[in-house]
Amino acid sequence: MEVEVRNEIQKPINPDTLGLWAFAFATFLGNVSSLGFWGDTTMMVGTALVLGGIGQVIGGWFCNQRDDLFGLVAFTCFGLFWIANGVEAVFASLKIFTGPGLLETGWYLCLWTVFTLMLLLGSLKKTRILTITLLFVVLLLFFKMLGVWLQLKVLIDIGSICGIISAVLAMYIAYYNFISALTGKCRLPMK
């Protein structure tokens, strides 16, 4: 009896979908919270640690497996960003450490703005919608940085709105990637 051996080359699964959904959920919920719709809840801290943090680190790890330096750096670093924010919230609530002051928070956001600007420049050879998404992340961090340093809540709120826009754009890209992987095509535009 002969067994037919199929010699198909299977296309690897795109881990960007996981990383983008994790980024989108944590960013959306975090910025809606920042606008005052709800406070720092256990749901928010859990989302930051597990979905925004661990979810993106896993996405970054799988990007590494397919030699995608951009995805590795973006998802892993932003995953660690969310884990750091979640751990900070836990430490502050347990009064293990005091929360950061305005100066420290401003510099923290400044460094993340510079890092995200690097990602934005690195995305110029990728899809336009990814570049626009990262532009809104840069604006999110920049306006929050200025808002913290100048103590102007309106700037922090503008940053939060930019964050919500970036989250919705990331959801769109993730949905596009997911449907394309499942069906081989997606009717939504992607440039």
Image: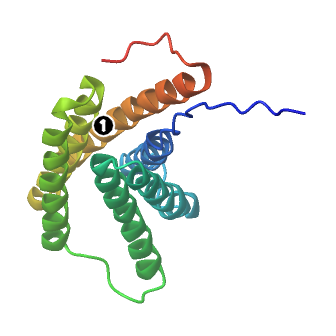
Q: Quadrant of the C terminus?
A: top left
Residue furthest to the right in view is 1
Image height check: is 173 above or below 142?
above
Residue furthest to the top in view is 187
Q: Residue at x 49, y 10 (%)?
A: 187
Q: Position of residue 121 (x, y in %)?
A: 13, 40
Image height check: is 169 above or below 63?
above
Q: Position of residue 82 (x, y in %)?
A: 39, 61
Q: Give the side of residue 134 with respect to residue 66, left or right.
A: left
Q: Amino acid at mark 1?
A: Ile
Local SS, label 1: helix
Q: Position of residue 94 (x, y in %)?
A: 48, 84
Q: Position of residue 132 (x, y in %)?
A: 23, 29
Q: Residue at x 24, y 36 (%)?
A: 136
Q: Quadrant of the N terminus?
A: top right
Q: Give the side of residue 16 with respect to residue 133, left or right.
A: right
Q: Residue at x 24, y 24 (%)?
A: 128
Q: Residue at x 21, y 37 (%)?
A: 123
Q: Give the side of residue 106 with respect to residue 71, left or right.
A: left
For mark 1, what is the residue?
161
Q: Give the side of residue 175 with respect to residue 118, left or right.
A: right
